[in-house]
Image (cartoon, grey):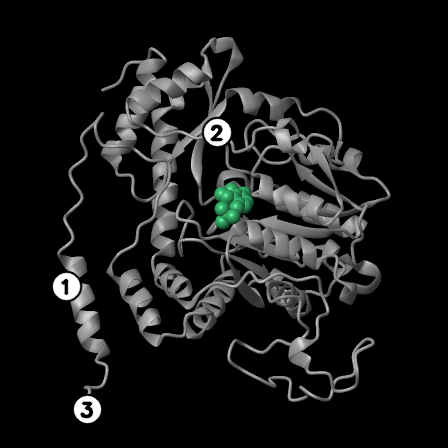
Amino acid sequence: MSAPPNRAAVRAAVTAWCDALPETAAFEPGRTPVPVSGKIVGTAERLAMVEAALDGWLTTGRFNEAFEQRLAAWFGLARALTVNSGSSANLVAVSSLFSPRLGCAAMRPGDEVITVAAGFPTTVNPILQNGAIPVFVDIRPDTYDIDVARLEAARSPRTRAIVLAHTLGNPFDLAAVSDFCARHGLWLVEDCCDALGSRYRVADEAPAWQARMPDARDPSLWRPADDAPRERHVGAFGHFATVSFYPAHHITMGEGGAVLSCEPDLAAIAESIRDWGRDCWCAPGCDNTCGRRFDWQLGELPRGYDHKYTYSHLGYNLKISDMQAACALAQMDRLEEFVAARRRNFEYLSERFADCQDVLALPRATAGSAPSWFGFPLTLRPEAGVDRVDMLRWLDQHRIASRLLFAGNLTRQPYMTGRDYRVAGSLEVTDRIMSDTFWIGVWPGLDEAMLEYAANRIRLFLGRDFD
Ligand SMILES: Cc1ncc(COP(=O)(O)O)c(C=O)c1O
């Protein structure tokens, strides 16, 4: 007879293997790369992934359930649903707004969605994929987020939603955007892929606009207890929030993301779209969770048609494996520490560049927010006469990684040619950041020596001294 599987022995072996990993070599300026982003995955994550693999369950299972619950609780939202990427999260969130279950509140092809062109393409793509029309509004040069003063001019009788990312972790003006959505009965999707852990102030009283949202929210969300911080995580303000767990992001599961909502009914729509579009909500391996599997009479289907094979949405399969969920569950234990390190690194760089503001425009946190920064954006002032390509080449030569603000001006990207979109006013600032902005890393894997080196190389390029 073979011996029963011994998980403790496997755990001990994995731990010993992790303990024997070589120490990270000491930082050597000019030789060791200074990446813009990266993952920090240790023994706990490896153990969790092995544990999930030993289960042999493979698809979403107990680790996924635990992770979804923990993530939803961390946001203070009703539900979190994992998906296989942040892009899929945006696709599911936006597609959910077109669900027939929403009745007259459902969006339709040809409706308009206010957004920005300065960002990542898959924030905007689901609008096009659903046959709606993105309406691009310019951004502010200091926060890199939507210029809310331009919202009213962007609105038309066809405007039905706002879909925006919190750029590089800096929250957009949630008070103004939420108020605008409420006054005009618009849906709001917050793309938090780069902003896990960013916070935004909460009004003392439930804002007047809350009552006019297309849903009924839990008022307790807006009336924190007296001793509670008067801030909430971004993602808790819109109808849907989305997150990415790609290794560059605040926590990782390799590839992955999540859709969150404060509304159980909206989350149920998102779950259906994630899971093939089916009407049934059985977890993998389960049957008859509703207790009426052979009793439903839906649409034009024969009476009692198996609920498992009844489809109420045009769906996908965007689920993750339990090994991915196990990794992210272990990462949750380190999330606060990661966020604190990102804030610290951001502060350090802000200080190092404080006297360069004649040449470099420094980022500013949106009023009322505490960003969990994704990167440190810098914009070269045109009057400084510094060429961005020269600067980025210089950084590259010194092994300091840099990135642009993603697509820059999305309307100038080749794939947008011939697509149906509208530009509200000019995209002057968006164009400027496309030409003059870049960002460097603030992720927790960067220590002070690396940050100091990166800052000093930039200073040297600008002709500033350093010590
Ligand atoms: C703002 C934003 N939204 C969405 C995404 C897409 O996430 P993913 O790479 O997990 O698909 C990204 C990617 O970095 C992003 O920056």
Q: Quadrant of residue 264?
A: bottom right
Residue 16, label in figure: 1
As drawn, 223 above or below 123: below
Q: Quadrant of residue 253?
A: bottom left
Dot placed on the residue nearer the N-terminal end, 1 or 2 = 1
Task: Report if residue 334 is visible in the image.
Answer: yes
Specify the label residue 1 is tagged with: 3
Q: Which mark is residue 249?
A: none
Q: Is residue 266 above or below residue 415?
A: below
Q: Nearer the viewer, residue 189 or 214?
A: 189
Q: Would you call the spot at circle 1 few (<14 residues within 10 Å), some (14-19), or many (20 or more)?
A: few
Q: Nearer the viewer, mark 3 or mark 1?
A: 3
What is the x, y in percent for residue 193?
51, 48
Per the rendering, the mark at residue 404 is 2
Q: Amino acid at mark 2?
A: Leu
Label 3: element kind: loop
- Residue 195 visible to the viewer: no
Indicate which disc, 3 or 1, sits on the residue closer to the N terminus. 3
The C terminus: image quadrant:
top left
Give the spatial CA distance, label 3 vs label 2: 61 Å
SS at badge 1? helix
Identify the residue at horizontal 30%, vertical 54% (top origin).
Answer: 41
How far apart marks 3 and 1 lie (CA) works out to 28 Å
Percent x, y of residue 355: 38, 19
Q: In the displayed structure, does residue 16 sit left or right of residue 311?
A: left
Kindly check if marks 3 and 2 are in contact, taking CB atoms under 8 A apart as contact: no
Q: Amino acid at mark 3?
A: Met
Tag 2's secondary structure? loop
CA separation, marks 1 and 2? 40 Å
Relative to 344, residue 459 above or below: above
Q: Is the CB–ligand 1 distance for label 2 below 8 Å?
A: no
